[in-house]
Amino acid sequence: MRNSMRTLRTGLTLVLMLAAISCGGGDSSGGGSSGTTAAAGNVVSVIVDGGPTATSGAINTLYTTVTICVPGSTTQCQTIDHVQVDTQSEGFRVLGSVLSLTLSVNKATDGNALAECTVFGDGYSWGPIASADIQVGGESASSVPIQVIGDANFQSVPDSCSSQNPTSEDTVATFGANGILGIGVFAQDCGAGCDVAAQNFYYYSCPTSTTCALLTAPTTIQVANPVTLFATDNNGTIIDLPAVSSPGATTVTGSLIFGIDTESNNASGSQTVLALNGAGNFTTVFDGTSYGDSIIDSGSNGIFFNDSNITQCTSATGFYCPATTENFSATLTSTNGVSVTESFSVANAETLTSDDPTFTALPDLGGTFTSDAAGFDWGLPFFFGRRVAFAIEGLNTSVGTGPYTAF
Amino acid sequence: MLKPPIRCLNHMIFAFNLSVVPLWSSMAHAALGGPEAAVVAEARQLNASVKSIEHVGYRVQEIQLPSGTVMREFADAQGTVFAVAWSGPAMPNLRQALGSYFDVYVNAPKDKHMGHSHLEIRQNDLVVQSSGHMRGGFHGRAYLPEAVPAGTALDEIR
């Protein structure tokens, strides 16, 4: 009885204090109509450019435009440009300062407000979870759990969140985008692990917006990959970008295609199909070492790998700065017996960015990786000049069952 | 990915220690720049298993965290921790692992946005490399360049 009383009172508190996500009133996007005179079909345009603001200075960062609506509404919608396209995360996230809609905060399993500490390799993004209808190109999904990063009502970041990877990325400037569209190979951003206390470092229950504590979250309430919730074209994605000549280009435009083998424009061909393991990774063999946590990541802006023989930059920390362009090759291998060798080049990152500051697409950008012989990251340069498909876990295409990457 | 139930208990203890700052900050600093002995004591408190590995010029305390992530703390001949490295499904608690260098890391200028999978800072007193993502795992290391023992290659810090 006491428990149910407490639940009721908590529920009232929730309604009073946390019922809505604050509106940042960002002007980068138009609210109002249902937006998109969306190109029909399963394609949305993507672009590599300098980013959401004049001072973003983005390099090799892939963006698209996403429209979100209050669930069920065709009028309370907002179209958001410069949403980063990320093949190594799942779900849609928008910066609170950009959001002009009023969305209701979703509930954790205990009835309190649900919030998340999204941990990236480079930092964390904190904010509540809400549901929204999502339109990308001609595809749409209803009541998708999304995250509002840096929401004005949730400014108190739990210590257990900021202690993980302590660089806060809760503003457009620090995040480098107005939002992010995670189209990785999983249906949710965490999965079954977050329903187990020992594995949940991400989902929080918030009795008030300043007293959030870790609480397990079943997959049904986690931030969801919107692709899996489309009515059709929901088994994966293809990113199609043109080749970029060295040293670079001012902008690059291409396509994000939804579905694999579901329409005439997304048929599997004779490309290499690289099966991914349960963590979405494969193995790269480089210079005699096997890197078992390799990824192909549209959200990384270079080829990141460990080679202590290459000169590192002095000002562009984390990137390589060889005196002359160096050429490499590495072999991508997978549990399905596939093995394919790819070549890549690494030029001087500081020269690349200073010789023509208008360039935002740099095919020869390479960076360092910690030396634990585990990770090799094929970032956006890998995508230039080809179609790269990502099949979602457990879903079928004509050439296999996800998770796989094909190119 | 699911762990036996005993792991849950371990993690609850672990999380409690992390969230109640005074509890652990009152202990000896088991962290970068601090004494190696505190690492072992603290790991025991966290119910984490510890394995000691001798190398030429330094010793590694390998700590299996309840999350499944492995953290390695590198101590020189005097028993001072000069590097930490981590690898596994979740980030370790860097506030704890970096100790007094945590704030140095937080406040370090991050001049080039490298995308969301990587971060590197490189200062005279501290180098941190961090990579990863939520479904695929995290890797990283932090070390004190001026404290790395002579003859120890940086590639050994992993």
Image (spheres, rainbow, N blue to C red):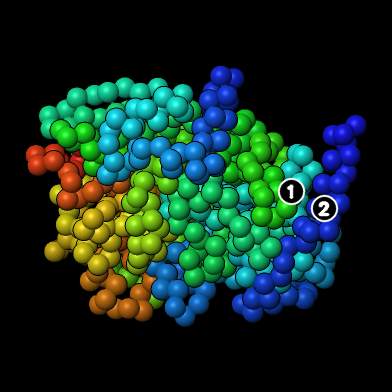
- What residue did someone put label 1 on? A207
Nearer the N terminus, badge 2 or badge 1?
Answer: 2
Disc 2: CA contacts within 10 A as few (<14), some (14-19) or many (>=20): some
Image: A98 above or below A144: below
In the rendered image, which quarter is residue B15 located in? Answer: top right
Q: Is residue B114 above or below residue B132?
A: below
Across and down, in percent, residue A342 comes to 30, 46
State the residue position of label 2. Answer: A13
Is B33 on the left or on the right of A244, as rendered? left
- In the image, what residue occupies the spot 54% across and 41% down? B20
- Could you tell me residue A78's position as x and y percent? 71, 70
Secondary-structure class at tag 2:
helix
Residue at coordinates 61% horizontally, 57% vertically from top-left? A156
The chain under label 2 reads A
Q: Amino acid at mark 2?
A: Thr
Quadrant assignment for the C terminus of chain B: top left
Observer-nearest residue: A228 or A45? A228
Vertical relation: A146 (above or below) B89: below
Q: Are marks 2 and 1 in contact (CB under 8 Å)?
A: yes
- Which x, y percent locates residue B30? 35, 37
Considering depth in this image, is B1 or B79 the residue closer to the camera?
A: B79
Name the residue furthest front: B26
SS class of the residue under badge 1? loop
Q: Residue at x 47, y 48 (%)?
A: A163
Residue A3 higher or lower than B106, as above or below: above
Numbered label attached to residue B111: none
